[in-house]
């Protein structure tokens, strides 16, 4: 396993920066074979644009300063390689602030010139652009960057860690249940959730395709605390059927979490299993035709995709405009209507007049033209979940769920967050003609306004139920797909009185020490194989006979490693190096306890290397 940790070895900051950039440019690539370091627009990831530059095509004057650009790229790719965050949005914003502050105070953007004043000025700049809550987040990110610069000797006259003068507003005492579920509470509009549940319970023939799609997504959100984009990225074969240690059949969904916790299985409570299965089955039916089209795009040997109305004729025979229209999936038999339909389609790179006449296409040439209409990132929805379009549970055809437009069976559409939200949220001023799902089914409040809700409400509700039920913070974070357990507080709406009575009822004696059992070196049992890519934290103890899972809140066992160094192999060393990478990232993210586990594993690795 290649070492991903950069270590500064020079006395001069400039030389260390140069080595760091070379290390990241030549040894790290997390963006695939087509990645080009020199391109200032990393498509789908980052654009290295100045803080105040306008959006659009990136011009040279809007690009980060040449003195700063390579460091920014190196910083981003280095931290991307160490962790599994999908995007380093806050880090990118902080880097842009540092660049602007450097230029204002020093006249150049060399990172080696950073001082406490540069970071103070960066905060001042951020206060003029963002809300105080965003500034507080930026301040925490700037603190991590300052520590990183000092620890790696990247700065010339900056030896003390900078501390942000802005702190996030401390949350008040826990709210009462009435405040939480009231009109303005985070768990308000429970009636809207009940309304969606009642719509979901209706028979299929009473629902439109749009109703089925919206309520099925909502039902899955209520089965386990997920984000909408995690549900929209589910694979068609996401269902997991396993038996637990007691032989009880369990049901779960394979999900790739979007907040750094990686791939995981969300186990569904027994009461919600029928709901999840029904939602999955409905989404499967809706996406069947679109997934078939995606499979056709993947299989280059198939020349023609047969829609429901496609004429069964020789693929090399010239087509009339009616046959072209039917080949594309439109059940139209009148010539003028076909010409009008084709006139409004974006085919042949926008040169539509060619397809409004007879005998311009054969089935083979028509579908060969359509192959150019694959999404940019095809065949994958994204590079993180590795779900293919052909296996995407929520994939649809363009306009498939539209109540007035014909479905474009020849074109794929991946539903987005906004696509889902327009159907459960209040209608915007520009979209007054559109009825959301509550209005379509007659659910209004006392003022005659259709119900609406926010996407995170099911997530907040499930997290609160989990806390009521006594689930630990670590398990809540894991169940919710969070990398940092401290994010739990934003989803925790239990009252102060409830938590006080809950803790009192536990009767735990926390004064007694806890320790690991003795390691039996003569154990000869076959241990489970653990996938290093699926670790959500780095609190593991590995040995040649197996592993033990802990959490960061517990101090590493003093008896560990407790093994004969002569038994060490390359596989064990690889596991320790992987843990160090995770520990380092968690430490940088401020996860409590990660630093002591990092120190522990570094000492262990040193012992292995010296053996």
Image (spheres, rainbow, N blue to C red):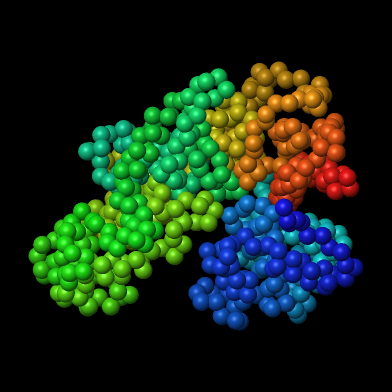
Q: Residue furthest left?
A: 334
Q: Quadrant of the C terminus?
A: top right
Horizontal placement of 211 versus 253: left or right? left
Q: Quadrant of residue 31?
A: bottom right
Horizontal placement of 397 versus 96: left or right? left
Which residue is painted at 24% across and 57% down in the image?
306
User: Which of the two residues, 61 or 263, is positioned nearer the viewer here?
Assistant: 263
199 above or below 334?
Answer: above
561 above or below 13?
Answer: above
User: Which of the two residues, 200 or 116, is positioned nearer the viewer here?
Assistant: 200
**x and y percent of residue 176 in the render?**
56, 31
**x and y percent of residue 114 in the render?**
79, 69
Task: Answer whether residue 340 is visible to the viewer in this image.
Answer: no
86 above or below 73?
Answer: above
Which residue is painted at 86% across and 59% down in the image?
160
Which residue is painted at 24% across and 53% down in the image?
403
**x and y percent of residue 175 in the render?**
58, 34
């Amino acid at each position: 396993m290649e070492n991903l940790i950069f270590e500064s070895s020079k006395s001069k900051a400039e030389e260390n920066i140069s080595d760091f950039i070379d290390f990241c440019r030549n040894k790290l690539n997390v963006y695939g074979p087509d990645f080009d370091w020199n391109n200032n627009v990393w498509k789908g990831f980052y654009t290295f644009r100045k803080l105040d530059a306008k959006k659009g095509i990136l011009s040279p004057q809007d690009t980060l300063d040449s003195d700063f650009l390579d460091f920014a790229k190196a910083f981003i790719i280095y931290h991307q390689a160490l962790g599994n965050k999908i995007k380093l949005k806050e880090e990118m914003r902080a880097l842009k602030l540092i660049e602007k502050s450097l230029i204002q105070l020093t006249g150049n953007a060399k990172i080696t010139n950073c001082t406490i004043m540069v970071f103070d000025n960066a905060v001042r700049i951020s206060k003029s652009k963002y809300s105080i809550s965003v500034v507080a987040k930026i301040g925490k990110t700037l603190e991590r960057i300052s520590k990183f610069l000092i620890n790696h000797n990247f700065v010339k006259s900056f030896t003390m860690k900078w501390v942000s003068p802005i702190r996030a507003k401390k949350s008040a005492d826990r709210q009462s249940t009435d405040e939480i579920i009231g009109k303005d509470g985070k768990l308000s509009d429970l009636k809207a959730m009940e309304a969606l549940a009642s719509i979901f319970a209706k028979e299929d023939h009473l629902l439109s395709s749009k109703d089925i799609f919206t309520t099925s997504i909502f039902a899955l959100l209520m089965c386990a605390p997920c984000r909408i984009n995690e549900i929209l990225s589910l694979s068609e074969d996401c269902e997991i059927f396993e038996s637990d240690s007691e032989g009880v059949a369990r049901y779960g969904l394979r999900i790739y979490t979007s907040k750094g916790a990686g791939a995981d299985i969300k186990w569904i409570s027994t009461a919600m299993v029928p709901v999840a299965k029904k939602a999955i089955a409905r989404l499967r039916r809706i996406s069947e035709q679109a997934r078939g089209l995606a499979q056709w795009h993947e299989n280059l040997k198939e020349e023609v995709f047969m829609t429901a109305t496609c004429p069964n004729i020789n693929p090399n025979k010239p087509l009339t405009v009616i046959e072209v229209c039917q080949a594309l999936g439109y059940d139209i038999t009148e010539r003028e209507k076909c010409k009008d339909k084709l006139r409004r389609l974006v085919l042949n790179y926008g040169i539509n007049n060619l397809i409004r006449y007879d005998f311009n296409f054969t089935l083979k040439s028509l579908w060969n033209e359509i192959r150019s209409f694959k999404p940019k990132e095809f065949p994958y929805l994204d590079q993180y979940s590795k779900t293919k379009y052909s296996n995407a549970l929520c994939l649809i055809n363009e306009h498939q769920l539209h109540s007035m437009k014909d479905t474009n069976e020849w074109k794929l559409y991946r539903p987005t967050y906004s696509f889902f939200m327009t159907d459960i949220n209040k209608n915007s001023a520009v979209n007054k003609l559109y009825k959301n799902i509550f209005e379509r089914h007659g659910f209004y409040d006392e003022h005659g306004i259709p119900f609406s809700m926010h996407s995170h409400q099911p997530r907040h509700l499930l997290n609160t139920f989990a806390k009521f039920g006594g689930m630990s913070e670590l398990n809540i974070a894991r169940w919710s797909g969070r990398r940092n357990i401290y994010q739990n507080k934003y989803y925790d709406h239990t009252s102060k009185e409830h938590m006080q009575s809950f803790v009192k009822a536990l009767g735990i004696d926390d004064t007694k020490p806890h320790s690991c059992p003795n390691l039996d070196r003569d154990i000869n049992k076959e241990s489970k194989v653990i996938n290093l890519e699926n670790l959500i934290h780095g609190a593991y103890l590995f040995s040649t006979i197996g592993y033990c899972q802990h959490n960061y809140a517990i101090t590493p066992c003093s008896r560990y490693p407790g093994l004969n160094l002569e038994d060490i192999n390359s596989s064990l060393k690889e596991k320790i190096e992987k843990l160090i990478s995770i520990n380092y990232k968690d430490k940088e993210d401020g996860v409590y306890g990660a630093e002591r586990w990092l120190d522990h594993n570094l000492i262990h690795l040193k012992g292995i290397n010296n053996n």
